[in-house]
Every structure is written in structure tokens, then in C-alpha cells.
């Protein structure tokens, strides 16, 4: 019997891209894991790839983003609650990723067994994060912060003793209870305030030492992510200057610490994860490190977060291009599959080159974390963390927009995955330092740690040897490096050049020759491809800006 509501047959539709092993099906990822010394983890990553790419995980991701977190500031009697509730799908995603060790696997050697650290533990975790971000990127925020908090906790023996065993547990425990009663904890972070943003030196939150040797903290944070974490690392000002504190949700007597959430941010993307505004009303905090040394104490955490930003962005790019290629393989126009059309082939291949480069650069950075005792690896980590974070996160948004266009109108519709990927992409470029912050960090290395820059440039020089285009690009880079009067205005040009040259060198020396040839010809030896903020040093910037400012008087 025919359906009386049917008016026509639906044909030429693309099947869903579900139940795909996100590890086994990704050649570039497999090669990067092997190249950076973590091939022994392939079986584990293969299993997680099946989980992350399953239809069940896809449905959990949809639910977690459709039913966003909700804040309850008070109960029905007017008493403070300050509780954020998440959809059960979010907790299921967290449970899967925590079981995979994304909050703690690189620190397993700190556990009671005292095992020898795995040689490639950061590369393995980067691969797991790469898969988890494709499963659902929003829940990766607390995973990243908890993992990155460990080197900070180690600066205080008492806090490390009390909190590390709970961080090192792979059992996810979402309950709002004192940490001592839980199977595991997550740790968040609150750095920025209304009046300063990235400039934490403008922070006004005050911390006063009390009779118990702890600190009473009064003030606010404009952004505090994952507000249902069990504790937060926050900056507050003592008489000696900006200092770092651990602020738990519960105090030792079981009472709730005085963190008053004002509202949740209504964000472009990252919707499954809550971000909050919070006020501290004589909240209690534990000092980490020395008073007045808060920023140096938090630097390690920022470095680990920046690695995750790059890895996650590469994952979003991979997911977008994979969906675009899948669409082109199954969608027909004029009787031909789109994948066979010359223009579509060029677009998809061009997108793929940047995905390959982003994976190569991010996983090379992860390897430097594994070999931090090697001065050359430590130098790569110091200089190339902001370089990699800048470039990979910066190219993600335009790449995903182009991939979305490959799907036509369907790509713009929320029922398809590209729209969510596009909304998610900007957060990694903004979080833990936007493009200018990364560029200024690179300049600080060049000016204050020249031996670090020398290690990296010597490695690049050796990697470029024998390739005419790469050698010429290296010489151009050197010319910028040795023009200090131009560095301030050419910082972005320098960072982008460093990133593309390093990616090209990795692809040339250890990658696929077809990919390397095409990347070098189009990104290194071809016409310039620029991000915003380059090539304006000879123009009257004040005159340009005067036409834009809303405060002009004429």
C-alpha cells in the first residue's frame, strides 16, 4: 500500500557518516602516531576510534548540545544553590573519555604504583583527544583543564597529596559532593575579569591570609569554564601581588565554599560545556607557589591547554573534511559523482593538505612534551607551542567554512554536523591566548631566550636542507628574525611563516611525498596566503582606525 502523503521518491541523498572507526580510517593520524613513537598504542586507539565514531556517540553529542547546561542559583526557599545541571548525555561522554585517561593518562606514573612514565604518553593522549574532539568537542574542556592542572598541583605538597589520587582515577563521578566522598574529581580554571580580560595584571580580586593560614578571597571572574568542577585554579591579588590559589567547591567541614554563580554564558559554540560568571564572597582558597608569583605558577597549565587547543582544532578540521569528502563521493550532479568533478577534487585536496599539516605539526609538538628533558625538545616545546596553537587554530574556521560549502545548503543546516563544527572552531583560537597573545609570546622567546630560538632554527635548517623551496623559505624567515625593528609589526607574519615551514619540513622528511609536494608548492613556494594583521606596516594605521572608531568627534 502506498503512503498517501508521498508526493515523490527521494533520491541522490548521502548516507549518514556513522559507525566509522575514527582512528583506523584516518591515514594521516595513523602515520603521525607511528612517526612520533606511539605505534604500540594502536590497538587501544583503534578501540576508542570505534567508540568515538559510533552512532551511539553521535546521538549523545546531539543531545548534549541540544539540551544545554542550566544554572540554579537558589532553591525554592531562597537559599544559595549554585548548581549547574547537564543532560545525562554529557555525563555519558565524560564517562567515556575519562575511562580513556584523557584527564590523567600522562600522569599515571605519579600514582601509588610509581610506574615508569610511558615514553610516548603525550602523543598517545593527543591521539585520544583527537578522537574525543570528533566525538563531541565541548566536553573536552574539563578534560583539558584537569589534565593541565596536575603540574600546578605538584607545586603544593599538601594539595598534591589530597587531590592527585582523585585526579588520577579514571572513574568519572559527576556528583556535587565533597571531594573526599567522591571517586574522582575534575578541575576548572578562572583567570580573567571584567575589566582586564587577557590582561590578568588588571585583576582586582583580593586574597587575605586568615588565622588558619588559608586565604579569604573576594572578587569575581568573568569567565570560569566547567563550573561544576570540584575545584578551580584562580588568580587573586595579595599584598605581594598576583597569586595563584586552589578554590574547592566544598570546604573541609563539608560546607559549600562561597562561589556564587551569576549566570552562564550564551556562547556561539561549545554549548554542551558551561562557562560561567562568578563572584567570590569571602571564599576560601589554598595558596599554590609563592605570593606574587601567580602567573609563573600557572604557565605550565596554559602550555598544556595550548597543546590541546591545537590538537582539538586539527580534529575539527579532519571531521569537516571527512564529511565533505563523504558527501562528494555519494552526491551526484549531471549523472557524475561530485568527487569526480575537477573543481571539487581541487577544493577537497586543498583542504586535505591543511589537515595533514595541522596533524603533523600538532603531533610533533606532542612529542616534544614527551622528551622535555632533551634541550632541543624543550626548546621546540617552548617556541612551537604558541606557534602551533596560533596557526592550527587560526586556519580551522575558514577551512571548516569551505568544507561546509561543499555540502551546499545541507552543510548550513544544524541537522548536519558541519554547522556545529563551524560554531565550535573559534573557541580554540580564543581560549588560552588569542592570535596576538601567541605572537607576543613568540617575540618574548626571541628576545629573552635566544638559545631556544637557535635550537629550533638549527633543526629547521637541517630539515630544509636539500629542498630548494624550503631552503629559500628558511632564508626569508631568518631575514625577518634578524630585523628586530620590524618584529613588533611583523609578528604574525613571523609566526605563520614558522608554522608553515615547520609543517612543510615534517611532511617533506617523514610524510607522504604527494602531500608534501603539493603543500610546499602552494603554501611555501606559491602566492601568499595571509591571515589578518599582516602587510600594513607602511600604511597610516591611525588614519584608517579613525574612520572606524565609534568615538570620533567629527
Image (spheres, grey):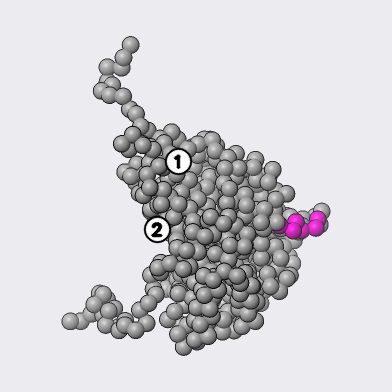
The secondary structure type at the circle numbered 2 is: helix
> Circle 1 sits on which residue?
326
Question: Magenta residues, as a range?
Answer: 115-122
Q: Earlier in the sequence, mark 1 or mark 2?
A: 1
Q: Which x, y percent locates residue 475?
A: 53, 78
The residue lying toward the viewer, choosing from 181 and 50, is 50
Q: Is residue 224 visible?
A: no
Q: Which x, y percent locates residue 428?
A: 48, 60
> Circle 2 sits on which residue?
398
Query: From mark 1 to mark 2, how far is it between C-alphas?
Result: 19 Å
Q: Residues within 10 Å of mark 1 (few under 14, many from 20)?
A: some
| Number of disc labels | 2
Q: Quadrant of the C terminus?
A: bottom left
Q: Is residue 415 left or right of residue 285?
A: left
Q: Is residue 478 visible?
A: yes
**From what the image shows, is residue 91 above or below residue 230?**
above
The residue lying toward the viewer, choosing from 460 and 470, is 470
Which of the 4 image quarters holds residue 384? bottom right
Amino acid at each position: 500500500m502506498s503512503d498517501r502523503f508521498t508526493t515523490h521518491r527521494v533520491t541522490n541523498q548521502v548516507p549518514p557518516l556513522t559507525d566509522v572507526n575514527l582512528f583506523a580510517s584516518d591515514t594521516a593520524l595513523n602515520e603521525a602516531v607511528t612517526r612520533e613513537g606511539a605505534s604500540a598504542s594502536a590497538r587501544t586507539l583503534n578501540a576508542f576510534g570505534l567508540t568515538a565514531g559510533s552512532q551511539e556517540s553521535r546521538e549523545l553529542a546531539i543531545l548534549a548540545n541540544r539540551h544545554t547546561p542550566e544554572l540554579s542559583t537558589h532553591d525554592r526557599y531562597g537559599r544559595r544553590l549554585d548548581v549547574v545541571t547537564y543532560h545525562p548525555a554529557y555525563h555519558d561522554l565524560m564517562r567515556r573519555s575519562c575511562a580513556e585517561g584523557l584527564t590523567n593518562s600522562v600522569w599515571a606514573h605519579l600514582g601509588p604504583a610509581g610506574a615508569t612514565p610511558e615514553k610516548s604518553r603525550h602523543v598517545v593522549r593527543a591521539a585520544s583527544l583527537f578522537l574525543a574532539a570528533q566525538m563531541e568537542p565541548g566536553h573536552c574542556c574539563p578534560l583539558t583543564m584537569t589534565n593541565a592542572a596536575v603540574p600546578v598541583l605538584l607545586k603544593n605538597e599538601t594539595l598534591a597529596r589530597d587531590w592527585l589520587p582523585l585526579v588520577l582515577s579514571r572513574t568519572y563521578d559527576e556528583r556535587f559532593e565533597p571531594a573526599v566522598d567522591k571517586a574522582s574529581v575534575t578541575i576548572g580554571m578562572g583567570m580573567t575579569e571584567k575589566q582586564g580580560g587577557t590582561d590578568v595584571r588588571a585583576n582586582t580580586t583580593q586574597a587575605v591570609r586568615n588565622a588558619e593560614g588559608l586565604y579569604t578571597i573576594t572578587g569575581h571572574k568573568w569567565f570560569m569554564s566547567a563550573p561544576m568542577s570540584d575545584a578551580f585554579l584562580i588568580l587573586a591579588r595579595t599584598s605581594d601581588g598576583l597569586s595563584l590559589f586552589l578554590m574547592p567547591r566544598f570546604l573541609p567541614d563539608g560546607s559549600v565554599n562561597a562561589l556564587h554563580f551569576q549566570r552562564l554564558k550564551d556562547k556561539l559554540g561549545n554549548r554542551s560545556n558551561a562557562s560561567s560568571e562568578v563572584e567570590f564572597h569571602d571564599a576560601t582558597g589554598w595558596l599554590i607557589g609563592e605570593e606574587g608569583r601567580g602567573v609563573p605558577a600557572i604557565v605550565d597549565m596554559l602550555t598544556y591547554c595550548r597543546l590541546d587547543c591545537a590538537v582539538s582544532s586539527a580534529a575539527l578540521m579532519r571531521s569537516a573534511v571527512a564529511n565533505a569528502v563523504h558527501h562528494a563521493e555519494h552526491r551526484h550532479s549531471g549523472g557524475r559523482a561530485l568527487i569526480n568533478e575537477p573543481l571539487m577534487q581541487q577544493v577537497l585536496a586543498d583542504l586535505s593538505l591543511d589537515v595533514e599539516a595541522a596533524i603533523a605539526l600538532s603531533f610533533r609538538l606532542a612529542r616534544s612534551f614527551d622528551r622535555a628533558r632533551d634541550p632541543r625538545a624543550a626548546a621546540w616545546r617552548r617556541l612551537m607551542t604558541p606557534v602551533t596553537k596560533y596557526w592550527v587554530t587560526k586556519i580551522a574556521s575558514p577551512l571548516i567554512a569551505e568544507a561546509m560549502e561543499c555540502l551546499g545548503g545541507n552543510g548550513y543546516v544544524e541537522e548536519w554536523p558541519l554547522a556545529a563544527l563551524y560554531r565550535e572552531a573559534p573557541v580554540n583560537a580564543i581560549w588560552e591566548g588569542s592570535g596576538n597573545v601567541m605572537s607576543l609570546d613568540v617575540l618574548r622567546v626571541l628576545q629573552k631566550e635566544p638559545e631556544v630560538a637557535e635550537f629550533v632554527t638549527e633543526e629547521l635548517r637541517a630539515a630544509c636542507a636539500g629542498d630548494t623551496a624550503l631552503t629559500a623559505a628558511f632564508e626569508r624567515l631568518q631575514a625577518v628574525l634578524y630585523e628586530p625593528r620590524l618584529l613588533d609589526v611583523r609578528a604574525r607574519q613571523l609566526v605563520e611563516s614558522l608554522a608553515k615551514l615547520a609543517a612543510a619540513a615534517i611532511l617533506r622528511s617523514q610524510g607522504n611525498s604527494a602531500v608534501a609536494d603539493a603543500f610546499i608548492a602552494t603554501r611555501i613556494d606559491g602566492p601568499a596566503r595571509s591571515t589578518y594583521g599582516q602587510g600594513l606596516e607602511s600604511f597610516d594605521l591611525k588614519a584608517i582606525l579613525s574612520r572606524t572608531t565609534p568615538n570620533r568627534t567629527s
